[in-house]
Amino acid sequence: MGHAPSSSAQVSARPRVPGWVPFVVLLALLVLVPTLLWGFAGPWVLLALVPAAVGALTINHVRIPREERAVSPGGVAGPTVRPGVVVLGGLFTLVTGFAAVLFMWAEPAPPRIAISAERVIAASADRVWARVADVSDRKSWCPWIADADPIGRGGPPQVGSTSRGTLALERFTVPGDLTITAFEPDARFAWNVSPSGGSELSNIHETITLIKESDVLTRVRYEIAYEVPTVFGRIGERIAVRGSVERLAETSLDNLNQRVTAPR
């Protein structure tokens, strides 16, 4: 009668997974999942090589000694697993993996962003327009414009008129120029906002549109559009800036409503 093979012989007969397999699996996950969710990130996917390599080394550090002990007499031969290596390797993999995914999340994002909000104000369009068209008074209801003083030629505001302002952008205060691009009484006001520096945002455009609902009701649409040309800027914009701009749009309309409807 034949003898059943020993457990060690069974383990030794089991094919060992090559050491490069964890690297390939991790790299595929780090690249394919963000690509399916947000789109291909181009050369930025190369950042995934670092966490994939470190993660694979960490996995092999745990896996290979265990396999060698399993096939050795008494199960004690071969290298041992070092907990410090496992902890540091795991942490480094998580940190670099998160950073790689963050860049792959931001790179396919569109560089042009538009954020808007609407309110119906209980006032006539001409009354709302009187407040909107008063450039010097903009700071009383628009919290991101601390000052707006007309410069250049005199006269009433019109397309091409420029004001020098102080802008509260991304928790910083920077000077900037505001040039009117649309001035349609009782209907539409728009201007380009050009910060002098200290901001990842560029080509900022603010538009205020009035839609007459009735003689005593006016729908006001407030929009801020801007560009974030760099990947680093888009990361900051999506994490920290966009939420504050959305709140800014809502707050501006609330403040405008209070200013327009306040008793005279």
Image (cartoon, rainbow, N blue to C red):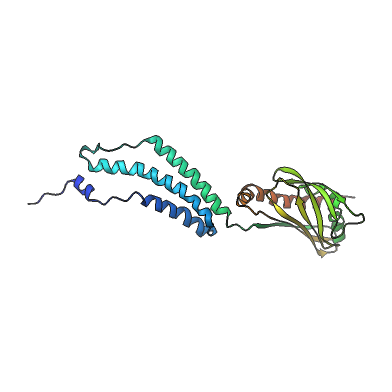
Identity of the residue furthest to the left in this view: 1
Q: Nearer the viewer, residue 108 or 10?
A: 108
At horizontal 25% and vertical 37% (from top left) the residue drawn is: 77
Would you identify the image quadrant in which residue 78 lies?
top left
Residue at left offset 80%, top offset 53%: 178
Question: Residue 210 at x, y = what percent?
Answer: 80, 61
Q: How many marks?
A: 0
Query: Residue 8, image x and y in percent?
Result: 20, 45
Left or right: 173 in relation to 46: right
- Residue displayed at 36% across by 52% down: 21
Q: Residue furthest right?
A: 155
The residue drawn where x is 40% and y is 50% is 23
Image position of 108 with respect to 81: above or below: below
Side of 83 relative to 221 (left or right): left
**Relative horizontal placement of residue 99, taking residue 153 as reference (left or right):** left
Q: Position of residue 101 (x, y in %)?
A: 52, 51
- Front residue (pair 197, 17): 197
Query: Percent position (x, y) of residue 20?
Result: 36, 50
Determine whether, in the image, residue 171 is placed left or right of residue 108.
right
Towards the viewer: 236 or 196: 196
